[in-house]
Image: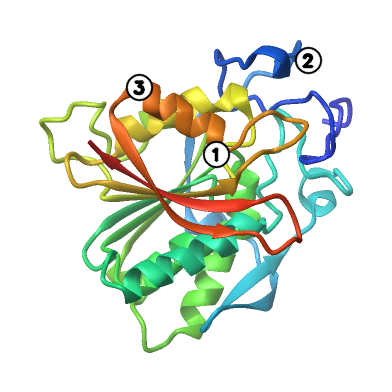
Amino acid sequence: MATNPTFQLFPSSNDKSSQGSGLGLGFLDSPEPALPPPPPPIEVFSSEASSIAVDKVTIGEITLLKGRVSTKEVFGLPNSDLVPGVYEGGLKLWEGSIDLVKALEKESLTGNLSFSGKRVLELGCGHALPGIYACLKGADAIHFQDFNAEVLRCLTIPNLYANLSEKTSSVSVSETQVRFFAGEWSEVHQILPLVNDGETDKKSGYDIILMAETIYSISAQKSLYELIKRCLVYPDGAVYMAAKKYYFGVGGGTRQFLSMIEKDGVLASTLVSEVTDGSSNVREVWKLLYK
């Protein structure tokens, strides 16, 4: 693993993630380094989880816990946001995850969203704060996906249980079907329990798909979008996506991703919130629905 080059996610460079392939954007394209084959998709079980230290994070009126796990401890990769094809940044708490929880709370308070009885999938979960929020709001099933099984074992699962143990008056994990899946977006549908394979006459699939900071790589976007269409229940499923408007240096961003969706003509997009606090690039939360 030490022989793989280490990349930061946002500095100016031409490196891209390897979770998907086959989608280019003119001058932003560049030759990609040879990457190792992705690990096969697998289900990770709660019994495999390790213990972690946690800190409190305040999100509006909500207080959740976030685990403290370093890439050096788990992958032997100090100070790394991303190693394409090996580690996809799941141990870091990205801004979009916080933005998404805020947006979900706003949507819930205004009556535009209810998790009660819903089947939810969080893609690229990492700390899984959006999925944890959905669990605490009464979702019937929560399935978490990350590229790395190590992220699920060392962060997602223990962070979920730490949060649930803090909320003794809320839904318990025994009342919710919680499962964890590792794998690349082009392959993980093979093991996800609720897949409709894009057939719009079926009620199978997930009612709500959550994802934050998943569209930074142009090369990954096509497989991510195809996975969404395979998994989103028709006709009332909804996707909540938090991301930056542009990911400088890696080419992705909401404008490029939404352009692809518009050309496909299956889903419609609505802006839920925009964050321009000056701390980073413009951040957005979008809602995707079937047309």
Residue 206, image x, y percentages: 28, 46
- What is the spatial separation of the Cα atoms under label 1 and label 3, in whole angstroms? 15 Å
> Would you say 146 lies left or right of 282 here?
left
Query: Cβ–Cβ below 8 Å for labels 1 and 3?
Result: no
Q: Which residue is mark 2?
A: 33
Picture coordinates of residue 59, whole percent (x, y): 57, 76
Q: Of residues 265 and 184, which is closer to you in this image?
A: 265
> CB atoms at circles 2 and 1 under 8 Å apart?
no
Q: Quadrant of the C terminus?
A: top left
Q: Which residue is mark 1?
A: 254
Q: Is residue 85 left or right of residue 221?
A: right
Which mark sits nearer the N-terminus, 2 or 1? 2
Instruction: Return the x and y of residue 28 as percentages of the image width and height.
Output: 71, 19
Q: Residues within 10 Å of mark 3 (few under 14, many from 20)?
A: few
Identified by mark 2, the residue type is Pro
- Callout 3 amino acid: Asp
Give the alpha-carbon distance from disc 2 to disc 3, as whole Å: 29 Å
Dot 3 corresponds to which residue? 264
Q: Using a 10 Å C-alpha cutoff, classify the residue at mark 2 as few (fewer than 14 neighbours), some (14 to 19) or many (20 or more).
A: few
- Which badge, 2 or 3, comes first in the chain's sequence? 2
